[in-house]
Amino acid sequence: MIEIPEEFAQSTVAREGEQGAAWVARLPHIVDELLEGWDCVPDGAVMHGGVGVIVPVRSADTGPAVLKVSFPHPGNVHEPDAFVAWGGRGAVRLYARDDDRYAMLLERAQPSTLAQSADPDEMVVVAGRISRRLAVPAPAGLPRQSDRAGQWEHRLLVDAEEFEGALPGRVVQAALATVRELGSVQPEVLIHGDLHPRNILRAEREPWLAVDPKGYVGDPAWDGGTLLKSMGLLFIAADDPGLEVRRALELFADAAELEPERVRRWAQLHAVEAAYWARRHGFRRARGGPELDRLTALAGHLAEALTF
């Protein structure tokens, strides 16, 4: 029976409460049943992400693979659907799925991520190329980003009123314009939904493969915003952060074959949302104190740098 990493157990219970504690207690038994059902044996130390454990395994059918079991949450429902649609194109392959237990048997990639690259330009270009490969016609039944546009607008208006003066008015108005003009009408394209350097792994079948998709239908330029927001600490360390972030979005748009202006607008919206989220909830890496203040200021700087 596997041992659940203590850090993962604690964070799950802190986030999900009693339901999370009950699930963590069942998790070793769930993994044992899946290993038996898929005829696998453990083949390495248990790893984890934010919402699930990853068990390296080996089986006669697939060879090296990983068993991923996620906490049951609506945001995790369509991950296997995305892998099916991609069929290994720019992402790890799906070998088996158990939707009732939020479990998948996946192609094993290497543990190193794109985030470990010493070259920010490489991060942006690789992510752009991956985004282009993942932008395939969306299968039926997946959640549409366009259906969330009303929620985005409402949240922006509430945040702007509650945190009046936190961001310049022109910055907030630009984000609202993006939601109103781009949010409700989006392409019928499958996108990753959470594309950032930690969700792109080195691999053997291809140099890089994506993991942990949300499986949304929407504008591929949205993923450019997710990426650029996640790289904010790299930009803010530059002599001219605004210049660097604008150059990065140009690189991403070129690699992803997207309109730079759409990428910029979505990235600006992401930064505005992050600036308000920080004030309301904090971040996983900083719930308070000077580090949260620094990250909150960073989000605001990025939002202003991306407002034309």
Image (spheres, rainbow, N blue to C red):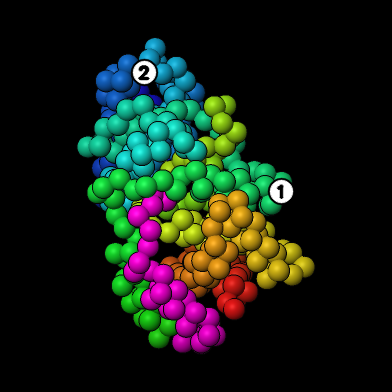
Seen at 57% across and 46% down, the residue is: 129
Q: Report if residue 253 lies within the magenta region.
A: no
Q: On the image, which quarter does residue 66 sit in?
A: top left
* Residue 93 visible here: yes
Tag 1: amino acid = Asp
Q: Position of residue 231 (x, y in %)?
A: 60, 57
Q: Position of residue 24 (x, y in %)?
A: 32, 40
Seen at 31% across and 34% down, the residue is: 103
* Image quarter hosting the N terminus: top left
What secondary structure is found at the residue carrying circle 1? loop
Question: Looking at this view, is 251 or 187 the one in front?
Answer: 187
In the depicted structure, whether residue 234 falls above or below residue 50: below
Q: Which residue is mark 2?
A: 40
First of labels 2, 1 by sequence position? 2
Q: Which residue is mark 1?
A: 119
Whether residue 230 sits left or right of residue 6 in the image: it is right
Question: Looking at this view, is 42 or 220 the one in front?
Answer: 220
Whether residue 103 sits left or right of residue 127 in the image: it is left
The disc at residue 263 is none
Seen at 38% across and 58% down, the residue is: 187
Tag 2: amino acid = Cys
Q: Report if residue 172 lies within the magenta region.
A: yes
What secondary structure is found at the residue carrying circle 2? strand
- Over which residues does the magenta segment extend? 163-191
Q: On the image, which quarter does residue 59 sit in?
A: top left
Whether residue 25 sits left or right of residue 8 in the image: it is left
